[in-house]
Amino acid sequence: MHGFSRRFGFTAVSISALICAATPAWAQQKIDFAIHYPERSAATATFKWWIGEVDKATQGRVKFVPHYAAALVTANETLKAVRDGAVPAGSVHAAALSGQMPAFAYLEAIGGMPVERAQYLEAVKALRPVLERQFRAQGKGVEYLWSESLGELIVLCRNRHMKSPADWKGLKVRTAGRWQAEQLRGMGVSTVAMDVSEQYIALQNRTIDCALLVSGLASALKVHEVAPKVTLLRMSVNFNSFIMNKGIYDKISAADRASMKRLAVEAESRASASLAKDETDAVNLMKSQKADIYAITDAERSELRKGIASSYAKMGTEGGAAGKEIGDVLKRYW
C-alpha cells in the first residue's frame, strides 16, 4: 500500500482523512477523478458537462478535479485504486474490468450492448441497479455513477469489405481485449494483439490484414489511409463506466447525491446523442479522404452475430450469477 500511495502522491494519513472526514468538512474537499482519455478527446465532452453541472447543482460542495490521459492511474488499475481509496473516483472500461469482474464480459464483447439509441438507453437504465449492486460488492465497496458507450465497432481492411463470416476466415486482425479475440477466432480469424499506435505501420507493412476500431479513433489515427476498405459493423464494443470510492461517496449529503444521480441519467442520454454525431462526423471525414465505406445490412449483421455467438456461452459460465444478471438484460436486444 505504501508504494502504491507514493506512486500517486497520497499518504495513508491523507487517504484516511479524506474517507473519514466529518460531513461539515466535506464542503471544503475537492475530489480527484482519474480519466484514461486525453483531455481533448471527444469521449470526454459529456464527462466535462457532468462534473460542471454537479458543481453547480451542489453549489460547489461536490467538485471533481479531472486528471486526464491516465495521469493518476492506468485503466487496468483504476478499479483497485478507487476501491482502496488511493484514487477517489475514476473511469473504467469493460475490457479492463472483465479480468477482475468476469461478469463484465458481455459489456466488453462485440455486440453486447444494443446500438439503436432508444434500445441503448433502455438497456442502460435496466443495467443501473445491477451495476450498482455489483460494484458495491467489490471489497470495501465502489459506487457506480454512470456509463457511456465507446461506440460502434468498425473494421478497416486493406482490400475487402467484411460482409459475411466467410470474409473473415484466415485473416490476421488486430483486436483489443480477450473477448473480441475469442469471438473472432470462432470465425477462423487469426487475432493479433498490439498497441493502438502500432496499427498503421502494421497494416502498411502487411503484418495484419485488418484492424478493429471505433470510428473516431480510426479517423484520428488515419488508419483508413492504409486500410481504405472500411466496414461499419453496426454493433457495439466495450462500455465505459464512472465509479467512486463508496466511503467517500457516503460522506456526500443525500441531497447532493440525488443531484449527482439525476445528472448522471441526463449525462447518459447526452453522451449517446453526442457519440452518434461524433461517429457520423468521423465516418464522413474518412469518406472525404477516399475511404471506401460500407455499412452491413440487417441480414448481414444477423449472420455476423451468429458467427461470433459461440463465445457467449463461455462468458455466461465464467460470469456466474452476476454475469447472468447482465446477460439477462442484454439478451433482450440480440
Image: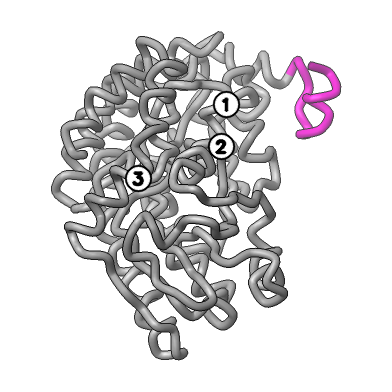
Front tag of 3 and 2: 3
- Find residue 247 and report its horizontal and vertical position in percent: 51, 14
- Residue at point 18% right, 39% down? 333
The residue that disc 1 covers is 99
Return the residue nearer the eye: 35 or 259: 35
Please state if 62 lies on the left or on the right of 202 as rendered. left
- Residue at point 85% right, 23% down? 3
- Residue at point 21% right, 36% down? 123
Return the residue nearer the eye: 2 or 13: 2
The residue that disc 2 covers is 178
- Find residue 81 and report its horizontal and vertical position in percent: 64, 26
- Find residue 33 and report its horizontal and vertical position in percent: 56, 39
Return the residue nearer the eye: 322 or 57: 322
Element under disc 2: helix
Classify the position of the C terminus by image quarter: top left
Q: Whole-Å distance between the Cαs marked 1 and 2?
A: 9 Å
Task: Tell me the colour scheme of the image.
Answer: one colour
Q: Classify residue 18 by image quadrant.
A: top right
Q: What are the residue bounds of the magenta stretch?
A: 1-13
Amino acid, disc 3 = Gly
Q: Classify residue 215 by image quadrant.
A: bottom left
Between disc 1 and disc 3, whose residue precedes?
1
Task: Inspect the magenta stretch and tell me whether residue 17 lies in it.
Answer: no
Q: Is the C-beta separation of discs 1 and 3 under 8 Å?
A: no
Q: Is the C-beta separation of discs 1 and 2 under 8 Å?
A: yes
Is residue 216 depicted above or below 328 in this figure?
Answer: below
> What crowding class fits label 3: few (fewer than 14 Cα within 10 Å), some (14-19), or many (20 or more)?
many
Element under disc 1: loop
Between disc 3 and disc 2, whose residue precedes?
2
Please state if 146 lies on the left or on the right of 208 as rendered. left
